[in-house]
Amino acid sequence: MLPLPAPWRPMRAADLPGVQRLAGLIHPAYPEDPAVFAERLRLCPEGCRVLDGADGPAGYLVSHPWHARTVPDLDTLVGALPARPGGWCLHDLALLPEARGTGAAAGAVEAVLALARGRGVPEAILVAVGAAGPFWQRRGFRAIEDPAPAGYGTGARLMVRPLTRPATPPPSGRA
């Protein structure tokens, strides 16, 4: 079991082999070329985090600005990020079993969503695969009708979470 709260840090290029190994262990049905992880890190280093474990990464989170209500296809290089993003894509979150249930995932997710909110991005978007839907629902995401890219498989759902705060009502007696 990892200590609480789990210490996430910025991902570095030196982490990529360990991240790739972890991705293969946790998401074997969704393989991605190492170049995909390297590109996301290069394009948005502040959106990429690593959770250190005893023998390398115990978890990672890859996220970046993107277009509204869509995500890049799985195992695809994107080339560049949009100049005016309509969404913040949580591309991948993976944790070893011993890191789950520690609050580590929620902390990392909230950190990158705060980054996105600070940049004025209106919503976060992701693809929930397998049984991950309830995890994301507990973090304020809701499924939408738009289809997930085919590479994510049947049952994959696009999910969004608004990042803008509702307007504060004026004080009583003021319009």
Image (spheres, helix red, strand yellow):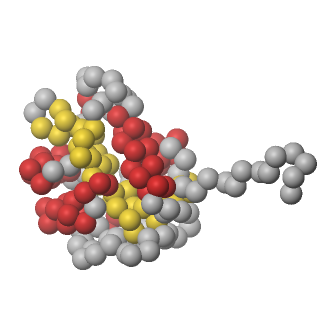
- Against 98, residue 107 (above or below) is below
Q: Quadrant of residue 151?
A: bottom left
Q: Position of residue 95 (x, y in %)?
A: 27, 40
Residue 163 in view (yes/no): yes
Task: Establish if 66 lies above or below 28.
Answer: below
Q: Is residue 131 among the parts visible in the rendering?
A: no
Residue nearer the viewer, 159 or 10: 10
Q: How many marks?
A: 0
Q: Farthest front residue?
A: 174
> How far across and down, in percent of the image, does residue 143 sit?
54, 58
**In the rendered image, the vertical position of residue 48 relative to residue 97, given as above or below:** below
Residue 62 at x, y = what percent?
A: 29, 54
For residue 145, side relative to residue 152 (left or right): right
Identity of the residue drawn at 24% across and 41% down: 9
Q: Quadrant of the N terminus?
A: top left
148, 54: nearer the viewer: 54
Q: Residue at image x 48%, y 70%? A: 86
Residue at the image point whose x is 26% and y is 25% from the top: 2
Q: Position of residue 128 (x, y in %)?
A: 42, 55
Q: Residue furthest right?
A: 173
User: The C terminus lies in which quarter of the figure?
Assistant: bottom right
